[in-house]
Amino acid sequence: MKIDILAIGAHPDDVELGCGATLAKEIHNGKKVGILDLTRGELGTRGTAEIRDEEASNAAKILGVQFRHNLEFSDGFLVNNAASQLEIIKIIRKYQPEIVLCNAIDDRHIDHAKASTLASDACFLSGLRKIETILDGNSQRAWRPKHVYHYIQWKNIEPDFVVDVSGFLERKLECVFAYKSQFHKKEADEPETPISSTNFRDSITYRAQDMGRLIGTEYGEGFTAERYPAVDSIFDLI
């Protein structure tokens, strides 16, 4: 199965938080989307890996993606090496995405920047035909995505472009809050974390509003690009 967009996250919920509304919009427009989680988030302060597995599955169903895979790399100890790159390359070659969306290039959590570089490197290497991979007993053909973009996470990184996601924020919030173990609950018997605060919960909306403000729409999601975005016509810009 060929897809249009592969969204990669270091942890379950990274994709929903970083680009959930963009994915919801593209799925609504008929695009095929898949999610690849690199770890199970097993070092998270709240919940367990098993709970996160269930929450990630529920979030994927809400979003309507074609698939969600987890490579089960070590949370907190991601390594950008040949072994990790090859596992991602296998997924890229299997689904042949045109666009890959991945973690922020710089962020508070150390896994995010590492996952960003790891995914980007794998996208490049996936296009080299002399790198041989075999999946399910079959030799794979080289495939390089046309574009690699990085969603914005904890830090307020200046975007290279902003996607108008007006009308799709509610779907994003529904997906995000499928991770019930991670976010604010009035009665919780687990420690507070930076993302379990009411401030963070509210920030999902007000940051989308601010991105929308920058482009003159109600809501937006920002991305950084590895090369200059190109348009066929100046009228393509909204």
Image: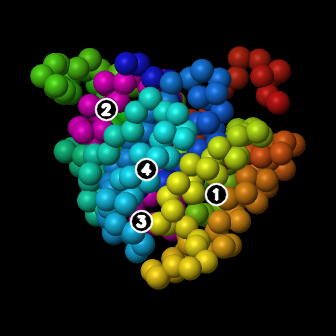
Q: Which amino acid does label 3 sit on?
A: Ile
Element assignment for label 4: helix
Residue 15 shows in the view? yes
Relative to residue 16, is residue 115 drawn left or right?
A: left
Element assignment for label 2: helix
Q: Give the x, y percent position of residue 75.
A: 31, 62
Q: Which amino acid does label 1 sit on?
A: Ile
| Quadrant of the snapshot with the N terminus | top left
The nearer-to-camera label among 1 and 2 is: 2
Task: Give the image quarter of residue 76.
Answer: bottom left
Measured Cα–Cα span from mark 2 to mark 4? 18 Å
Which stretch is magenta? 85-114
- Give the mark, 3 or 2, whose residue is nearer the N terminus: 2
Is residue 212 shown above or below 79?
A: above
Which residue matches tag 2? 91
Per the rendering, the mark at residue 110 is 3
Residue farthest toward the front in the current orientation of the protein:
187
